[in-house]
Image (cartoon, rainbow, N blue to C red):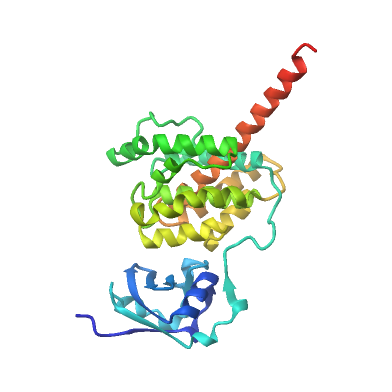
Amino acid sequence: MITEVLSVRCSTLISAGSEALRVLQHNQRGQVLAVFERTLYVQSDAGIVCVGLESVGRGPLQLLLGPEQHGLFSRAVRGQSVVFEEVTCLMEDTAYSGRRLHRPGTAELDLVRQRLRACSECVCRESGAIDAGFGWLLDVHASHSAAASTAIEHGLRRQSAAPLKRLKRWLAQADSTCPAGVAELLGAGPGLTPAGDDLLAGVMLALHENDQPGMACTLWQVLEPALATRTHGISAAHLRMAAKGQCSEPVRQLLTLLWADEPEDSVSDVRASALAVQRLADSIGGSSGWDTLAGISLVASAHANTNASANLHSLAIACSPH
């Protein structure tokens, strides 16, 4: 039986995310939901917060500890009671939301797509195909029928074929109604945040970056009712933030790189940019970074296909007899 109550002193926190601050303002007590090497998740009736080391990076859910409290992780166990002390020390202006406070760039989605492709080609040259999760979607030559390296990856591709097709069609048509079947991507694949969840988060974040918050909201309206049955609370909390255009610091850095408004001047610049994207994607746990990039690539590709269709339509009108 667990008797020790884990105490977190908020006066020594390095950073408090906006969502974590909201949760603590409603309830200063909770239970340990999960413990990892650098983070522990705490749940209360007000929501979920992520208590972590500074190396995790800021985020809307994060409460980053000062060095004097690093010993918490060795004492924490699942189900343990947690109390947050000195919450009044947390000020509103210290909150990190992960939201784009100002537009980091005005790049067209075609440029974003080119950067993603350069990153994919760079990885394929150095270490082969991006096979884990949905990373293979970044390879323009890949398909659902292409051979996967493991039975699990093969099963994920088969399972996701139909909902991915629906998602791509909806993004291309920019329809006001998102098909309910898209929610079948929730919980797909392994990981703390399943691959399908990370892909959907990438889609919603990219829609916000492309000034299409209405489409992100439409997608969220389909996903939210299915969260309880298709995925777990930690992943649902991160998805809820993505629906608002909010994300962790490493993901925000990815978005800033991809949406930079100035195109690269040379081949070496393109490669340097691709390597920077690759390093950031690798730094985001498991395949999560690549799954998020896969979701971003779906939005960029849908935009490119829509532009191509519009150009063909205009050409057909111009060539038709009057």
Quadrant showing the C terminus: top right
Residue 84 in percent (x, y) is at: 42, 83
Of residues 306 and 272, which is closer to you in this image? 306
Residue 293 in percent (x, y) is at: 51, 47
Residue 130 in percent (x, y) is at: 43, 41
Residue 280 in percent (x, y) is at: 52, 54
**Residue at 56% across, 59% down:** 244
Of residues 224 and 319, which is closer to you in this image? 224
Question: Which residue is the extreme one toward the right?
Answer: 322
Residue 42 in the figure: left or right of residue 107: left
Residue 321 in the figure: left or right of residue 209: right
The answer to whether residue 170 is above or below residue 100 is: above
Q: Is residue 241 visible?
A: yes
**Residue at 57% across, 70% down:** 96
Q: Quadrant of residue 52?
A: bottom left
Q: Is residue 125 visible?
A: no
**Residue at 52% across, 78% down:** 14
